[in-house]
Each structure stands twice: as structure tokens, then as C-alpha cells.
Image (tube, rainbow, N blue to C red):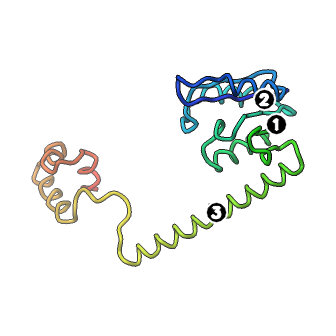
Amino acid sequence: MRYGYDRVSSKTQSFDGQVEQLEAAGCTRIFREKASAKDADRPQFKRLMKTVQAGDVIVVCKLDRLCRSSRDLFNTLHQLAEVGCGFTSLGENWCDTESDVGRLLIAVMSGVSEFERSMIKSRTEAGIARARKKGTQFGRPKALDDGQKRKIAEQHADGETIEALAQEYEVGVGTIWRALH
């Protein structure tokens, strides 16, 4: 079975042009959605992904109707491949898991994407290592310094409550508790 996925970003846009193309491509059922592709909550897309079975094909008019990044595309294609479902984009002839050339190009693009992620990861790790060598501290700044922690311990030993200390130092009760332990 061929399923169409039709998405428009705004309430004023029309589905008509995409529906015509998807019907001409042989789609027997079309899932329609008015939502941004960035929006994680796309109920019709989720419903489509639950509906497809092995041998089915999902068709879109253009890739940007389905996803906003190559990573999203490859994640979606991976999910479809696990089910045994094909994918075709009418606007991008190279993106067709139903043809040998399409599968080859998707594999090449996937390899390029993986290489790019690997390069970004190695550059990020190198940057972090350089920053650590320079003494850069990562994470949230400490709410209390060592001197404040010693003073809090002294005050608590003198009978000051954790709640009162939290108010005095303008931090949460948990921060005071951790400082004492």
C-alpha cells in the first residue's frame, strides 16, 4: 500500500497541491497535518508510522514536508527499514528506497552524514580538552564556595537550622544539606 504524508506549516496554507501529486503517485491514503516539521508532536506523522507495515511505501512531495535535517531523514528511513517499509520523495528523485540507485545514494548520503557527525564529535572533544588544559570549569557554577561551606558547618553546629541557612545564603535546602555532608 502507498501512503502519502502531506504537511503544511501554517493554518492558511492549503493541502490541495500536495494531495493532487500524492494521488497521482498512487497513494491510497494520505495523512495530513498542519504543523511545523520541527514540532516533535506531529500526531498524524506518528499515526502514519504506526500504520505502515512491511511492503508499504510512504510518499512525500518534498523532503522538507517530512523532516528538517538529514539526521531526521536518516532516523526516519532507519525506522521504516526496520519495518520493511519503503520511502519515496517526489521532489528529490535520488531519495527513493524502492530503486537500486536511490538505495545507493541514500547509503552514500548516510555515510557522509555519519562521517560529518564523527568529525564534529572529534573537534568538540579536542576543544573540550584544550579548554580543560586552560583551566576552564564546566557545568553550573558552584552556589557556595569552600569558605561558605565551612561557615555553614559552623553555624549548623551552633544550632542554626538548615532552612534558616538556606534563606541566609539564598540557596535551596538541598544545597545546604549537600554542603553539610
Q: Earlier in the sequence, mark 3 or mark 1?
A: 1
Classed neighbour count for the residue bearing mark 2: other residues with Cα under 10 Å, few (<14), some (14–19), many (≥20):
some
Q: Image quadrant of residue 6? A: top right
The disc at residue 52 is 2
Amino acid residing under circle 1: Cys
Instruction: Give the x, y percent position of residue 108.
Output: 78, 58
Q: Which residue is mark 1?
A: 85
- Which residue is depicted at the point 63% across and 29% down? 7
Q: Quadrant of the N terminus?
A: top right
Check the image and report above or below for 126 versus 82.
below
Residue most toward the left?
Answer: 158
Check the image and report above or below for 75 versus 122.
above
Instruction: Give the x, y percent position of residue 56.
Output: 84, 31
* Camera-side residue of 73 and 23: 23
Disc 2 secondary structure class: loop
Distance from disc 1 to disc 2, alpha carbons, whole Å, reads 7 Å
Disc 1 secondary structure class: loop
Q: Is residue 148 left or right of residue 99?
A: left
